[in-house]
Amino acid sequence: DRGGRGVASRFGRRRLEPPRGSREARPGSRRGARRNRGFESEPGWDRRLVLLGLGRSLGRRVAAGAQGDPKEDRGGSTSAQDGPAGGPAGFEGRGPEATDFDLEPSTSGEGPGKDPSEHGVLKRTYEDLSVKWTETPYRYKIVVAMALAFVVCNMDKVNISIAIIPMASDYGWTPTTAGFIQSAFFYGYLFAQLPGGWLSNKFGGQKVLPFGVVLWSAATAAVPFVAGDIGWLSFSRVIVGLGEGLSPPAAADVIARYVPVNERARATSFVFGGLNMGTVAGLTIAPSLIETLGWPSVFILFGVIGIVWCYWFNAVVPTNIEAEPEKPRERALAAEGNGSDAGDPAAEGDQGIPWGTFVRHTPLRALTYIHFCNNW
């Protein structure tokens, strides 16, 4: 049909020509002559149009035969609005090849525009990340895991700073009582420091750290159940402090055991930087949880996060370096780093802890004073 009213453009959109007899398409009209001449002068345009229509019609017939849907058969009328040849109204007598030029891919049951390969892309992405994590050196895995533990650590530390306001309102606490409950955390934190270092040296920080996380997470989740009794509530906060007090010496022990000397400063900064991230996360998430679900949800959710971390840590990080024999290079680097402390009397362990040297060491006293002022 040389004067065809439905012409497929390059991108598959339907371009309608004016009907015969209109001013634009009259043979004597310059505009119509130019338009008709433009179509006829395009090489092979009518052949491409017919092939495109036939291909589309054949595809629909095959799909209709596979699904058993008679409406997909363009050979007959499908609705009152369709023409006699099965096409839309206004295209009577032109056959199935001129009724539809929709080139968008469609999948049965998916709907137009949906990519059935989206699920496959997500699955491949997850598999790629899993492979990269598996190939990550052991020392990097444990450093990332400890940084996440320190994020949870400070989330459980600061949550009561926000929750104490509605708790005091519910139980009628005075400011003195609220201050005593908040300070109970630091009694446990203070007394856990030196025992935490001794336990880490004896059993290994990779065992002491999960124990501390379990301890403070369980005590955090128990707060809503003991909040009515000030004594038990204060005791639960002391246990939270004990668990979190084990974390810094355990992390230092793990870094000293498994990270080479030339990477220890960066590893320490990365791990202890999780404390600041935990403070930000805790102070940001807690108010929204309190407004939505009430103050008990803060302690329960944060406690559950710590328990989940322990399960994940035990699954991805072995309890000792010998559990990873296929990576001797990382083990050799860690051993080389530990060997750099050879000859140090304090490192040999047979001369005891040099408390007098600690007290007489001026830089150490200065750091202790600065740390005290910072916490004050």
Image (tube, rainbow, N blue to C red):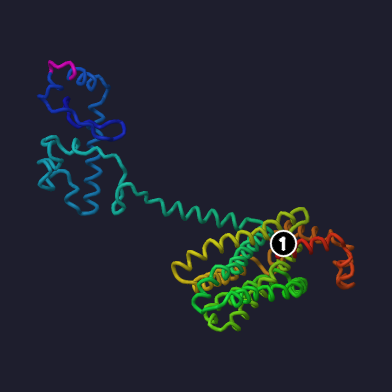
Q: Is residue 223 above or below residue 130?
A: below
Q: Is residue 342 above or below residue 4?
A: below
85 or 29, nearer to the observer: 29
Q: Is residue 358 above or below residue 51?
A: below
SS at mark 1? helix
Residue pictured at 9% horizontal, 24% vertical = 21
User: For residue 251, which quarter of the picture?
Assistant: bottom right
User: For residue 183, which quarter of the picture?
Assistant: bottom right
User: For residue 101, which quarter of the picture?
Assistant: top left
Q: Identify the amino acid type marked 1.
A: Asn
373 or 327, nearer to the observer: 373
231 or 301, nearer to the observer: 231
The residue that disc 1 covers is: 374
Residue pictured at 52% horizontal, 70% vertical = 298
Give the x, y percent position of residue 142: 66, 62
User: For this view, does 113 lie left or right of residue 366?
Assistant: left
Queried whether the magenta region covers residue 60, the answer comes back as: no
Q: How many marks?
A: 1
Queried whether the magenta region covers residue 29, the answer comes back as: yes
User: For this view, does 161 lie left or right of residue 207?
Assistant: left
Residues drawn in magenta: 27-31
**Which of the image's four quarters has the C terminus?**
bottom right
Give the x, y percent position of residue 250: 71, 68
Residue pictured at 12% horizontal, 36% vertical = 90
Q: Residues within 10 Å of mark 1 (few under 14, many from 20)?
A: few
User: For this view, does 59 lie left or right of residue 180?
Assistant: left
User: For this view, does 28 lie left or right of residue 278?
Assistant: left
